[in-house]
Amino acid sequence: MHANIIFDISQILALLIGVTLLVRPLGGYMKRVYQGEGVFLGPVLGPLEGALYRMSGVRKDEEMDWKHYAGAMLTFNLVTMALMFAILMLQGSLPLNPQKFPGFSWDLALNTAVSFTTNTNWQNYSGESAASYFTQVMALMVHQFLSAATGMAIVIAFVRGLARRTAETLGNFWVDMTRGVLYILLPIAFVAALVLVSQGVIQNFSPYKSVPLIQPTSYERPKLDANSNPIKNADGKPVTETVALQEQTLPMGPVASLEAIKELGTNGGGFFNANSAHPYENPTPLSNFLELLLILMIPAALTNTFGRMAGETRQGWAVYTAMLLLFVIAVGALYWAEYSGNPLVQKLGVGGYSMEGKEVRFGLGGSALFSASTTATSCGAVNTMHDSLTPLGGMVPMVLILLGEVVFGGVGSGLYTMLAFVIIAVFAAGLMIGRTPEYLGKKIEVTEMWMSVITVLTAGAVILALVAIALITPAAVRSMANPGPHGLSEVLYAFASQANNNGSAFAGLNGNTLFYNLTGSLAMLLGRFAPAVSVLAMAGSLAGKKYVPPSVGTLPTDQLPFIFWLVAVVLIVGALTFFPALALGPIVEHMIMQGGV
Amino acid sequence: MAKRRTKSKGIFDPKLVKAALIDSFTKLDPRALWRNPVMLAVEIGSVVTTVNFVINLITGKGEPAWFTGIVSAWLWLTVLFATFAESLAEGRGKARAESMKKTRKEIMAKKLKKPEPGAEYELVPSTQLRKGDVILVEAKELIAGDGEVIAGAALVNEAAVTGESAPVVRESGGDRSAVTAGTLVIANSVVVRITANPGETFLDRMISLVEGAKRRKTPNEMALEVLLLALTVVFFLVVVNLSPLSLYSVKAMGKGQPVTLVVLVALFVCLIPTTIAALLPAIGIAGMDRLFQKNVIALSGRAIEAAGDVNVLLLDKTGTITLGNRQAVAFLPLAGCSEKELAEAALMASLTDETPEGRSIVVLAKQRYDLRMRELPLNAESIPFSAETRISGVNIDGHAFLKGAGDSIAGVVRSLGGTVPPELEGHVTDIAKSGGTPLVVSRDAEVLGVINLKDVLKGGIKERFLQLRSMGIKTVMITGDNPLTAAAIATEAQVDDFLAQAKPEDKLRLIRENQDRGYMVAMTGDGTNDAPALAQADVAVAMNTGTQPAREAANIIDLDSNPTKLLDIVEIGKQILMTRGTLTTFSIANDVAKYFAIIPAAFAPIYPQLGILNVMRLANPFSAILSAVIFNAIIIPLLIPLALKGTRYRPMPAERLLVYNLLIYGVGGLLTPFVGIKLIDLLINLLV
């Protein structure tokens, strides 16, 4: 098989150009939304917005300081998480459940509720065989909107902290949430869902369908005795029987509506277990491209919103450039690793690049691009099985997650984490030019450093601690499908994905156990809310500061040297934290593969 | 300029080194090390490996005892190098404090019953003097306390404080009234009102400052420590994580040994930012010490760092930008008079003028036309300058040679029946516009021309302002001159802005305005009327010759009373921050190489494939780990000179400076340990 390199590269370029073209208009639109300026959807949605405030008693001009803002954010997330937990537990007695699925176990319900509240969308269940339509829509999809809007609200509050001078307040959480959902997420998701339907994504509430197979098939199944143990013959080999297959079950459901926000809100929790590899979620190369665009557009455009709100659009572009640089490196590495393929397989005469775990309709380019995009952002939707990537290819998504989800990152969370990296980079660089470091005219002092290191390092600390615990817990080791370095990669990936609120998985690890459900919930909660609260605290501190006008002696943070320095800081922090784990996981696996040992 | 107080000794002055060595052992006390958490972590690591070593020795199990022994020794050395760096930085200050303490002996003071020179006095020990007491100090006596001269004038030797042996005049009223305890009156006597209680005098404050007793961490230092602490915690988790990683890998591969405790501790110490943490206290102390060597006392470390951030510099024109006095630079004759004739008349008019301006006219006349008058003609009669006439000159042989302000001379000439040519007005205005002071010369009833007296810029001042501008610092000249003159001098000196006809409240307002715009403002001052502005400025440098209120309002005192010192202070402030930044970058960049040394070594028995990461081709796991530990330790003493001297600062735009330092300390920090560790590895294997 030969990869169509020219097609793949043009697809990569088209995506990069498409996203970059969206940055300015979408960024400007979001700025107008959050600053309460008129937008073209205002006449349509304005009355609805007003009605919501009247019903809930929100006074939209009432501003909050950082503590109130953080308090409102935490309260809201806790309450909606509890609601989702209840829906998951009580699913069996709720409507819209044609397949009669029972309620989730408590630990799975907890893990899932935490997962969708924290924008992680780690799934220890299979959508089509465990979740009712009511659950999918009212519990999961609702949170795909709410968790995305929460992330955006936090970053907007942070940007206000940077932009305001000697101010105490950061805006109103309820207003930011309402506007984010109403003016940004809903309209884009609505249009995107329609386009996806045009490509063949389904949208219905029908029971699952049984359809006859065009080409009936059969397979061998071990015979079981009354106690469900395999019956063995005299030689000790299992006795098998032939089963003929005449028909298959096709799961149905309101997929398109969930699919749109799944990508747009960098949620990633698929309707089906196969996620965006499933033809009902992602039927064509065009739908694949659209989903890529949806994943990247808001995190990318928020850099522009930030630049505009801070009054220096160039600062937004600088952050965008740093993100783009890291993204291009990642896509290139991933494509190269997969293109090089597996020498062990090639020796068997199956030449060419690695297609294991990939969909033929997306090809190498569409798959590599999706894997990189979904892990660069904290989306976590997959159209490729990351577990099947080559060792180095699989290391790329893992590294993108381990870097802290800052290469575009999650909606809102990506930008605020990156800005925390910016603060640390500014601090070191500022010292090197002999000034008290300052960013956008705000001096970086002890509070900012504390909050930045908490934001940047929490996920890493959680991952290191939980991986250590998992590796010495026999029950956790038993969950691995593959022993050796690959099993290690699976565990590392699982905690990395949860602590950084990504949600994609190195399949192969059985996550639906008490151990992984609970430790995973802990990782997701800490990875989401410790940085979120720190960022708001930092916003409060920054808002109160005076503005120092720039001079020749000020470090220019919108020029290439600083952009490269920022990229270097992100890479160095990631590399220093995870070098040993990566060496004993994917790197050694690669060496073993190359050596054929 | 004054001599340096102490001759600049090398950093490793044997006497200081010896004292520092002793002190560095006492600093190993965990209660003292608590202030430096990163090094405390290293000390705990050293204890762990030492215990491990003893167990190895006794049981003979585990790793070879020589290996754990050497690792332990080098970990202890790492801590010692850190405490040594701090002790060495403190040493210089301590030595100086000792010598100052010797001058602070108890003396008897003549406490006056009434605040007047002739009043009765009683002898009281200096330790019993309180604020508000009045004492009499006569020739050959030491001044017993800080105070202000309220009557009389005396010649005072202030070498005890400033290191300057030339005596200075201290007199009541004006800006030279402050006296300092421990200084010696050489001639005359003065009545002094005490302004500081014992133990709070300038000398006391200086001693506690240089001793470092009052050293507090600056906000910037604390922010950096947050970063270092956070990295230490993360690396602790990395190392803790490594143990289960290796346990799992051993089980999965069925061969090899889990990583041992000693290797884990070694890796931990190598990874945490020991280099910067070890040198961090020394950088701050050494910065203050470098200022001290320039005869500048910073009353807080915060003030020096603030100096590095200064955006606006307010400088007095006189004495800072220009030499103290105006000088004649040109003769401009009116029609019908030659330049030489004018020069002659000007020379005559200035014969008895002893002011610097008058002397400069004589000098110019001599330079231009070789005119000289060795002694005053006998029949000459001096006409002294008075505020009323604003004219001075000489009467010789019935001729009156006069010089003075334009309208005054015009008045005299007219009263003698002469006429004032209209072109005079033009000359006078031209000179004023160019920043000079016009001095009109007349002979009897005839106006001859105008002398151009000009402020002369200090040598090299323009270049310094250029440097400041490239550092992003705006300079504002403060002068009592009229706006026209001020503008001309400002242009010539290339300052960015000026404040003309400045009154004290104007200075205060200017500082406030700049601060409201977010700027950090520095200023120098010496007069009592500067005190409010000094108190308002972020960096306030008072001249030691200044008044007591000025010295109290300031946070930096310049013992040499040289206003251009502000530039040095800014530079040192920047150097301190830069040294911290560059060493942090260097320290963290080093970790990459240490990983490449230790990880393949630690995991070689489990995964021989990881040998490919051993890019330095280190001989064996033991020497690889040892080399990394040894490099990590000896880089500290190797960098002590840099920490004490500070990163070299060159004024250049921020971006270029960043790139420059990143290339040297970032890329350099990445590459150096590869070379260093390899060399140590070679050496170890040569010796073994």
Image: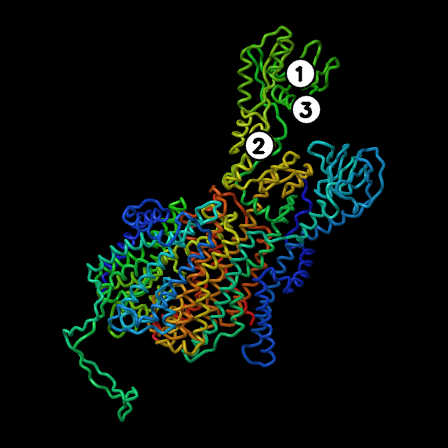
At label 3, the amino acid type is Thr
What separation in Å lies between label 3 and label 1 (alpha carbons)? Answer: 17 Å
Q: Residue furthest left?
A: A214
Check the residue under mark 1 and report the chain it is in.
B
- Quadrant location of the C terminus of chain A in the rendered image: bottom left
Same chain, marks 3 and 1? yes
Residue that carries the numbered disc 1 in the rendered image: B389
Depth order, front residue of B201/A148 = A148
In the image, is residue A301 above or below residue B110? below
Height in image: A379 above or below B478?
A: below
Packing grade of label 1 (10 A; few <14, some 14-19, many >=20) is some
Q: Amino acid at mark 2?
A: Asp
- Mark 3 vs mark 2, foreground winner is 2
Say which amino acid is labelled 1.
Answer: Thr
Location of residue A218 in the rendering, given as x and y in whole percent from the top left corner: 18, 80
Q: Which residue is mark 2?
A: B506
| Local crowd size for mark 2, using a 10 Å CA cut-off: few (<14), some (14–19), many (≥20) | some
Asked if residue B123 lies left or right of residue A179, the reply is right
Q: CA distance from mark 1 to mark 2?
A: 31 Å
Disc 3 marks which residue? B355
Where on the picture, by quarter, is residue A330?
bottom left
Nearest-to-viewer mark from 1 and 2 = 2
Q: Residue at x 54, y 18 (%)?
A: B429
